[in-house]
């Protein structure tokens, strides 16, 4: 029997990347990867929560990223709206970290903020 992957372990990996960035051969790559892993930890937790609580059905396409954000953002529930807004910010930062050649802010700053936001979202989503 296969056990489901624990998506929050991506947040743990992101912390490890940030904590060990200085000893890697490329600090910026470690920080960018931490931003990406933080987003995916929060994204998958949001999908799992929406599936369990709201019968959200992901289409298994790239549109799911936008749709889960909108699911929370356009809710009447203020907590859901905050989740959507924070997830949207994390996605924006993840896209910058994964696709922009030059970042407008320090990668370590972006990674630290992303990790804090992701961990906060994981706690909030677990409490729903």
Image (cartoon, helix red, strand yellow):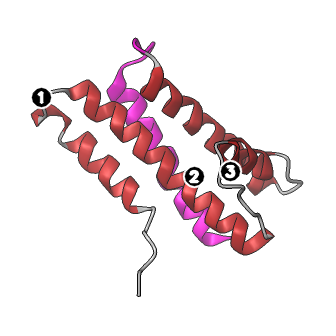
Tags 3 and 2 in contact by the CB under 8 Å rule? no
Please tell me whether the stretch drawn in magenta is mainly helix, strand or loop. helix
Relative horizontal placement of residue 59, taking residue 5 as reference (left or right): right
Query: Which dot marks residue 25?
Result: 1
Magenta-tinted stretch: 101-128
Q: Quadrant of residue 91?
A: top right
**Residue at 71% from the left image edge and 46% from the top image edge:** 69
> Which labelled disc corresponds to residue 43?
2
Percent from the top left, x then y, of residue 7? 45, 62
Q: CA distance from mark 3 to mark 2?
A: 10 Å
Kindly identify which residue carries mark 3.
Answer: 83
Name the mark nearer the viewer: 3 or 2.
2
Q: Residue at x 55, y 38 (%)?
A: 90
Secondary structure found at label 1? loop
Q: Is residue 122 visible?
A: yes
Q: Relative to residue 82, is residue 47 depicted above or below?
A: below
- The mark that comes first in sequence, 3 or 2, is 2
Left or right: 79 with respect to 76? left
Seen at 32% across and 29% down, the residue is 108
Label 2 element class: helix
* Above or below 17: residue 29: above
Q: Quadrant of residue 44?
A: bottom right
- Horizontal and vertical percent for residue 106? 36, 20
CA separation in Å, label 1 and label 3: 35 Å
Earlier-in-chain disc, 1 versus 2 = 1
Q: Quadrant of the N terminus?
A: bottom left
Q: Earlier in the sequence, mark 1 or mark 3?
A: 1
What is the tally of numbered marks visible in this picture?
Answer: 3
Magenta run includes residue 7? no
């Amino acid at each position: 029997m296969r056990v489901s992957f624990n998506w929050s372990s991506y947040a743990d990996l992101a912390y490890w990347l940030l904590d060990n960035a200085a000893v890697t051969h490329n600090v910026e790559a470690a920080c960018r990867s931490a931003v990406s892993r933080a987003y995916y930890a929060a994204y998958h937790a949001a999908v799992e929560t929406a599936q369990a609580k709201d019968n959200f059905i992901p289409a298994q396409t790239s549109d799911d990223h936008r749709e889960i954000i909108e699911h929370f953002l356009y809710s009447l529930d203020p907590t859901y709206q905050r989740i959507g807004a924070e997830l949207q910010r994390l996605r924006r930062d993840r896209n910058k970290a994964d696709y922009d050649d030059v970042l407008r802010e320090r990668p370590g700053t972006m990674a630290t903020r992303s990790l804090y936001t992701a961990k906060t979202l994981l706690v909030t989503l677990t409490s729903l």
